[in-house]
Image: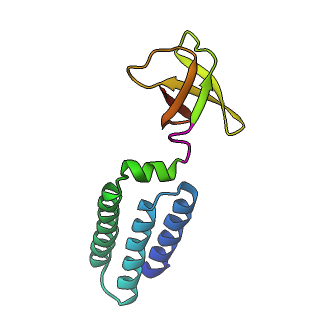
Amino acid sequence: MGDATMWWVLAGVLVALELLTGTFYLLMLGLGAVAGALVAMSGIGLNTQLVTAAIVGGLGAVLLGQWRKRQTTTPQEAQDQHLDLGATVQVDAWDAQGTAQVKHRGAAWTAVLAPGQIAEPGVYRIQAMAGNRLVLEKI
C-alpha cells in the first residue's frame, strides 16, 4: 500500500472519530492527513509528508483553540441563549442541603440559592443556570 493511500485512510479514520466525539480538533488533524496525502501524491519523500501533516494539523488545532477562546459571551448573549434567565419561580420550601424543587415551564427543576441569599419560601428570579440546576435570587 502506497504512502498516499495510508494518508487517505488515516484522514478517513480521523474524520470518523471526529464524528463520534464531536470535537473539531480531530477534524484539523484529519486535514493535516489530507495535506500529507497530497504531498505523497506529488512524489515527495516521507519526511516532508510527516512535516507537512504535522504543520497543517497542528496549526489548524492551534488556530481552532484560539478562535474558541475568543468566543466569549456577554451577559446579554447569555440571556439570549438561556431564555430561562430572569424568569420567576415559586419556592415552597428549601431542604437541609440548600436545594429546592420548583416547577418551571411545566417541569420539575432542582434549584439552589445564589451566593448571599437566605433560604426562605417565596418568589425567586432565575439568576443563572449551573448545569441542570437553577440558581435563584430572592425578589
Q: Nearer the viewer, residue 125 or 54?
A: 125
- Asked if residue 23 is positioned above or below residue 102 in the image, the reply reads below
Q: How is the image coloured?
A: rainbow
Give the overall secondary structure of the magenta segment.
loop
- Asked if residue 14 is positioned above or below residue 113 in the image, the reply reads below
Left or right of 29? Residue 45 is left
Question: Which x, y percent locates residue 93?
Answer: 61, 14
Which image quadrant is residue 59 in? bottom left
Question: Which x, y percent locates residue 133?
Answer: 55, 32
Point out the stretch of residues depicted in magenta: 83-87
Question: Which x, y percent locates residue 89?
Answer: 60, 30
Query: Which residue is at a point 30% across and 81% down the rendered structure image?
Result: 45
Residue 62 colored in magenta in the image: no
Question: Which x, y percent locates residue 99?
Answer: 55, 19
Query: Which residue is at a point 56% across and 64% down the rendered structure image?
Result: 16
- Asked if residue 134 is positioned above or below residue 100 in the image, the reply reads below
Query: Which residue is at a point 55% across and 48% down the rendered structure image?
Result: 83
